[in-house]
Image (cartoon, rainbow, N blue to C red):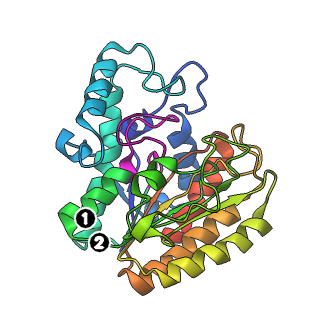
Amino acid sequence: MKPLLYVDTVLGNYGFPDGHPLSIDRQGAFWREAQRLGLDARASICEPVPAERRAIERFHTAAHVDRVITLSETGSGFLDYGDTPAIVGMYETAAAVVGSALDGAARIMYGEALRSFQPIGGLHHARRHRAAGFCVFNDLGVLIETLRCEHGICRIAYVDIDVHHGDGVFYEFESDPDLVVVDIHQDGNTLYPGTGHMHETGRGAAAGTKLNLPLASGAGDAAFMRTWQVAEELLQRQRAEFYILQCGADGLAGDPLGELRLSAAAHAHAAQRLVVLSTQHAQGRLMAFGGGGYELSNLARAWCAVLGRLV
């Protein structure tokens, strides 16, 4: 079966104006490269589906949703401490990002596909009660909660290779023993959000189900591949029923917001290994999300490398 691919104008509009790093031309850069490589013909193109408010509130507080709706109407101020500006219509756009993730999960659970890729998604910094780091709603958090309450999936593996630590997923599920987390990122001592240290492996009953694997500034593919071996050992032990990959492209050399020196080969390797693991343990169920990436040619290469392994 072809993997699902969520690419549409509505999703592409998730971004911010006036030179903001997360611009609205990111989806277009990926899509042009995907078409050049012929990957578009090997995937099932899906339209965005807006999430209902009750679905968003499986993860987020009602107060946070209220605030997003209000500032989305006025288009003034910031949704967080200054990184995520409010723009008119942002609630509807962010709800489409969340809803498309939930639509992909439903289609996979109903047997329409084994895998999906949503380049505009993977907003891993938003917390239950607030926006953060360009992320209005945490589509990943909503997805995890929905897989459990709607589809009966208990044990989920979340793998994050964005250059920034996925704090909005990690800390909101830090004490959850059934969410296995592997997060490979630039050392939080040198980069936003300043978290994700190696000693953080889960709390209470979840101790040992999480791995934070920080890379030193300037690390490249060789360091990533060594680190991946550690990550995969945990994933093999902690067998999951469903796999999620946040494949942010901001770890590639030359990204303006990161200091790693990866190539798209790192993303291809992670995606390929998760295809294998999901086939072994989870009936092939794997969803990938684009996450960060602020140099357009980089994200086009990295995301197409991931999609190439999914097809």
* Residue shown at 82% from the left, 52% from the top: 218
| C-alpha distance separating marks 2 and 1 | 6 Å
Q: Label 1 is placed on what type of residue?
A: Arg
Residue 63 position by quadrant: top left
Q: Please identify the quadrant where the N terminus is shown.
A: bottom left
Is residue 138 found left or right of 197 in the rendered image? left
Q: Closest to the observer: 290 or 158? A: 158
Q: Closest to the observer: 164 or 8? A: 164
Residue 189 colored in magenta in the image:
no
The residue stretch that appears in magenta: 118-140
Tell whether label 1 touches label 2 (CB within 8 Å).
yes
Is residue 286 found left or right of 30 in the rendered image? left
* Residue shown at 69% from the left, 38% from the top: 257
Residue 281 position by quadrant: bottom left
Q: Position of residue 87 (x, y in %)?
A: 40, 20
Q: Is residue 276 above or below residue 24?
A: below
Residue 179 visible (yes or no)? no
Q: Position of residue 217 (x, y in %)?
A: 79, 50
Is residue 155 found left or right of 297 in the rendered image? left
Q: Closest to the observer: 82 or 89? A: 82
Q: Position of residue 251 (x, y in %)?
A: 68, 51
Q: What residue occupies the far front of the structure in this picture?
A: 204
Residue where numbered disc 1 is placed: 148
Q: Label 2 is placed on what type of residue?
A: Cys
Q: Position of residue 161 (x, y in %)?
A: 59, 58
Q: Residues within 10 Å of mark 1 (few under 14, many from 20)?
A: few
Helix, strand, or loop for circle 1? Answer: helix
Residue where numbered disc 2 is placed: 154
